[in-house]
C-alpha cells in the first residue's frame, strides 16, 4: 500500500514537463508547492526535523550534472543511476540520512537524458551492469514514474547489459505486467527478520510483504536477487535470521534466485554520528561495533566471519548451489569465510 505524499514540491522549470504532468495526474488532493530549486527544500529546518518530516513529501525536479555514474573505475562497467534520489523509507542504518542536503525524495523528470546516457553505455560496453537503488529505493515510486517500463524496453533491445532494481518496496505491478520479461532485469530485495523490519527499517513494507512481492516477480518470470544486509546482531539474532532464511528459501524458488548477498553494518563516522543523534538506542550502533582499519564502524572480524559462516551454513542446507557474495568485505574475510564453506 503506497502512502500518498503529504505535499509535492515542483520545480517551476519542470511544471509543464510531460512526466511531471503524468505523475501529478496519478495523485489526487495533495498540496503542490512550486519552488525554484529542490536543493533548498527544508533548508530553514534543523537537520533532525528535516530528516523526520521531509521524507513524507515528494519533489519533481530537473537533474543537472551526471545522471549515470560509474562505480569505481569506468572500465569496470558497473554503473548506478541518479534518476531519483533519497527515499521515503527511513532505515536507521541508511547513509542517505546524511548524504544529500535535502531529505525529500526527488524524482528527476528529465528521464530522456537518463535513457540516452544508459543507451550510450549499452552501445559502448560489452556487458555493463546498472544498479538502481544506490541513492534511492529502486521501485518505491514506480507506480508513479513507470521507470521500469522504460528499462524493460531498453534492456529488451540491448541484451548485453543487466539492470538490477534494488528495493524494499512492493511496487511490482508494472514489472509483473510484462509478459516474458527479459532475463537481464533483476529485481532484488533486502530482507530482514520482521522484528528488524518493524523496529529499525521505519516505514518499510513488512518481511512478508517483501517476500510476496519477490515471489510474484519470480512467478512472472524474473530471476530475483536477495540481499541480507545489514545482518544485525540483536539478542537472539541466530533464531531470527535462521527462521528468515528458511522462510525465504522455502517460499522463493532457489533456481530463480540470481544471488544472495550478505553484509554486516559498516557505518562511516558521519553515519555513525547521525544514527547516534537520530536513533540513540539503535541496535545498529550498540553492542560490539568499533572503528575498523578503514575507519568504518563494524563488528570485529571474527564476529563477522562467524555471522557469514553461520548464515551460509543455513543457506546451503536449503540451496546448495546458490551464488553467495559478501557485500564490501576485505579479501581476508572472504578467504576466511569461503575456504571451508
Ligand atoms: S529502503 Fe534503502 S534507500 Fe530507503 S532508507 Fe532504507 S536503506 Fe535507505
Image (cartoon, rainbow, N blue to C red):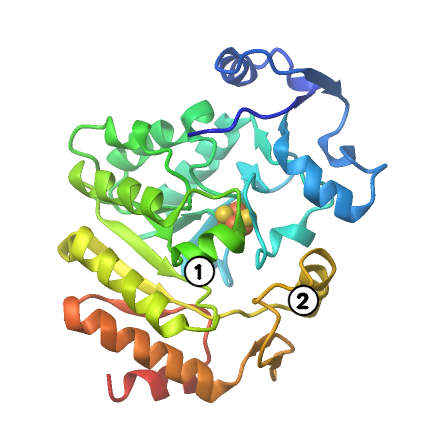
Res 187 quadrant in image: top left
- Relative placement, left or right, of 270 versus 332 is right
Name the residue tied to disc 2.
272
Q: Is 56 located above or below residue 75 in the figure?
A: above
Image spot of residue 157 (x, y percent): 26, 34
Image spot of residue 331 (x, y percent): 42, 82
Q: Quadrant of the N terminus?
A: top left
In the image, 182 versus 236, the foreground residue is 236
Mark before the other along the chain sequence, 1 or 2: 1
Q: Residue at x 59, y 56 (%)?
A: 92
- Element type at mark 2: helix
Marks 1 & 2, CB-CB < 8 Å contact: no
- Element type at mark 1: helix
Looking at this rendering, what residue extends furthest in the right direction? 44
Image spot of residue 248 (x, y percent): 25, 56
Q: Residue at x 47, y 37 (%)?
A: 117
How far apart are labels 1 and 2 at the CA level?
A: 32 Å
- Relative placement, left or right, of 29 versus 180 is right
Numbered disc in front, either 1 or 2: 2
Q: Is residue 185 visible in this depiction of the protein?
A: no
- Relative placement, left or right, of 107 versus 239 is right
Q: Is 120 located above or below residue 27 in the figure?
A: below
Q: Is residue 210 visible in this depiction of the protein?
A: yes
Q: Which mark is residue 75?
A: 1
Q: Residue at x 24, y 77 (%)?
A: 313
Mark 2 Cα shell of 10 Å, populated few (<14), some (14-19), many (≥20): some
Q: Quadrant of the C terminus?
A: bottom left
Amino acid at each position: 500500500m503506497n502512502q500518498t505524499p503529504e505535499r509535492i514540491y515542483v520545480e517551476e522549470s519542470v511544471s509543464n514537463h510531460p512526466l511531471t504532468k503524468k505523475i501529478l495526474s496519478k495523485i489526487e488532493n495533495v498540496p503542490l508547492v512550486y519552488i525554484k530549486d529542490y536543493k533548498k527544500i527544508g533548508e530553514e529546518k534543523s537537520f533532525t526535523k528535516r530528516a523526520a518530516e521531509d521524507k513524507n513529501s515528494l519533489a519533481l525536479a530537473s537533474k543537472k550534472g551526471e545522471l549515470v555514474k560509474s562505480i569505481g573505475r569506468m572500465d569496470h562497467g558497473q554503473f548506478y543511476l541518479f534518476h531519483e534520489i533519497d527515499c521515503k523509507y527511513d532505515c536507521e542504518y541508511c547513509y542517505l540520512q546524511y548524504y544529500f542536503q535535502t531529505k525529500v525524495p526527488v524524482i528527476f523528470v528529465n528521464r530522456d537524458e537518463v535513457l540516452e546516457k544508459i543507451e550510450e553505455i549499452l552501445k559502448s560496453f560489452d556487458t555493463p551492469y546498472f544498479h538502481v537503488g544506490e541513492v534511492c529505493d529502486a521501485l518505491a515510486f514506480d507506480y508513479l514514474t513507470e521507470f521500469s517500463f522504460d528499462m524493460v524496453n531498453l534492456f529488451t533491445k540491448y541484451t548485453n547489459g543487466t539492470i538490477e532494481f534494488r528495493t524494499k518496496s512492493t511496487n511490482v505491478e508494472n514489472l509483473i505486467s510484462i509478459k516474458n520479461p527479459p532475463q537481464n532485469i533483476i529485481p532484488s530485495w533486502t530482507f530482514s527478520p520482521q522484528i528488524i523490519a518493524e523496529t529499525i527499517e521505519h516505514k518499510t513494507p513488512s518481511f512478508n510483504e517483501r517476500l510476496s512481492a519477490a515471489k510474484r516477480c519470480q512467478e512472472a518470470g524474473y530471476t530475483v536477487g536477495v540481499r541480507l544486509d545489514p545482518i544485525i546482531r540483536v539478542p537472539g539474532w541466530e533464531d531470527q535470521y535462521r527462521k528468515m532464511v528458511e522462510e525465504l528459501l522455502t517460499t522463493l524458488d532457489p533456481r530463480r534466485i540470481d544471488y544472495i548477498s550478505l553484509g554486516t553494518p559498516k557505518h562511516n563516522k558521519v553515519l555513525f554520528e547521525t544514527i547516534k543523534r537520530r536513533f540513540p538506542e539503535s541496535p545498529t550502533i550498540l553492542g560490539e561495533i568499533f572503528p575498523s582499519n578503514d575507519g568504518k564502524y563494524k563488528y570485529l572480524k571474527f564476529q563477522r566471519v562467524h555471522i557469514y559462516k553461520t548464515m551460509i551454513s543455513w543457506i546451503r542446507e536449503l540451496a546448495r548451489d546458490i551464488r553467495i557474495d559478501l557485500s564490501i568485505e576485505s579479501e581476508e574475510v572472504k578467504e576466511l569465510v569461503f575456504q571451508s564453506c
